[in-house]
Image (cartoon, rainbow, N blue to C red):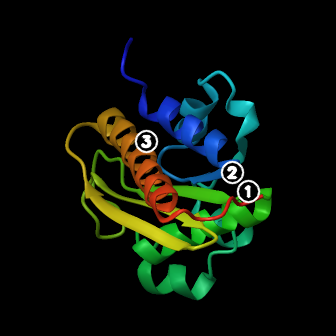
């Protein structure tokens, strides 16, 4: 039997824990949600997603503080964390996952292409990672999806190992 894909693994973990997930995506523009939705049974866990490609959408829809965006720009750990928490709150999910970054080809807001931040929000807290991804625009976006799903899987595994209560 083939090894499950990162999305299959995450959907299984969410289902087993009776948790739902929502996404907030900037540079990935819905790819994380799409990967999750590719998995049969994803409708049991996937609440929806927000594509917040424009910085203003991060503030107006997801509730990322405008002063934070002004201070740090959109590619920052605190912004990704606020995006993840905002998606979970907005869509009524137990878990939020977010991506923000620079896909390239050139730098943006002082960050080189390949700079990506992924974050996960749960009832027990926030987790985020800054990634430096090589390759062209498509490779960076795919790497961001992998990074987001890997972080989500680790957060869910840690939660399971601690014996955390289910979100619902």
Q: Which mark is residue 93?
A: 1
Of helix, strand and loop, which one carries label 2? loop
The disc placed on residue 33 is none
110 vs 95: above or below: below
Nearer to the camera, 105 or 159: 159
Residue for badge 2? 19
Q: How many marks?
A: 3
User: How many C-alpha atoms fall within 10 Å of the one at disc 2: few (<14), some, or many (≥20)?
Assistant: many
Pick the residue in front: 64 or 88.
88
- The quadrant holding residue 94 is bottom right
Image location (x, y in percent) of residue 6: 43, 34
Q: Secondary structure under badge 1?
A: loop
Q: Residue at point 48% right, 34% down?
A: 9
Residue 161 sits in which quadrant? bottom left
Lateral position of residue 98 relative to residue 153, left or right: right
- Quarter of the C terminus within the rendering: bottom right
Q: Which residue is mark 3?
A: 145
Q: Residue at x 29, y 70 (%)?
A: 110
How dense is the environment of label 3, judged by Cα within 10 Å: few (below 14), some, or many (20 and up)? many
Res 59 visible: yes
Are the residues flagged by discs 1 and 2 in contact, CB closer than 8 Å?
yes
Q: What percent of the width, then of the height, locates residue 53?
A: 57, 53
Instruction: Give the Cα distance between marks 1 and 2.
Output: 8 Å
Q: Look at the numbered discs 2 and 3 and tell me whether their residues touch, using CB distance below 8 Å.
A: no
- Residue in front for this viewpoint, 120 or 115: 120
In the visual, does 151 lie left or right of 135? Answer: right
Residue 34 position (above or below residue 91): above
- Rounded to the nearest angstrom, the CA distance separating label 2 from label 3 is 20 Å
């Amino acid at each position: 039997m083939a090894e499950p894909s990162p999305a299959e693994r995450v959907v299984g973990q969410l289902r087993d824990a009776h948790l739902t997930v929502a996404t907030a995506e900037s540079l990935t523009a819905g790819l994380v949600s799409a990967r999750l939705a590719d998995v049969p049974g994803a409708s049991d866990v996937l609440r929806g997603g927000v594509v917040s490609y424009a910085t203003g959408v991060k503030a107006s829809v997801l509730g990322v503080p405008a002063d934070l965006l002004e201070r740090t720009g959109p590619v920052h750990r605190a912004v990704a964390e606020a995006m993840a928490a905002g998606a979970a709150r907005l869509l009524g999910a137990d878990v939020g996952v977010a991506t923000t970054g620079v896909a390239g080809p050139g730098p943006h807001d002082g960050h080189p292409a390949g700079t990506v931040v992924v974050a996960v929000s749960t009832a027990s807290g926030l987790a985020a990672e800054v990634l430096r991804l090589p390759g062209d625009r498509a490779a960076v976006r795919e790497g961001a999806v992998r990074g987001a799903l890997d972080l989500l899987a680790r957060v869910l595994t840690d939660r399971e190992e601690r014996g955390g209560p289910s979100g619902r």
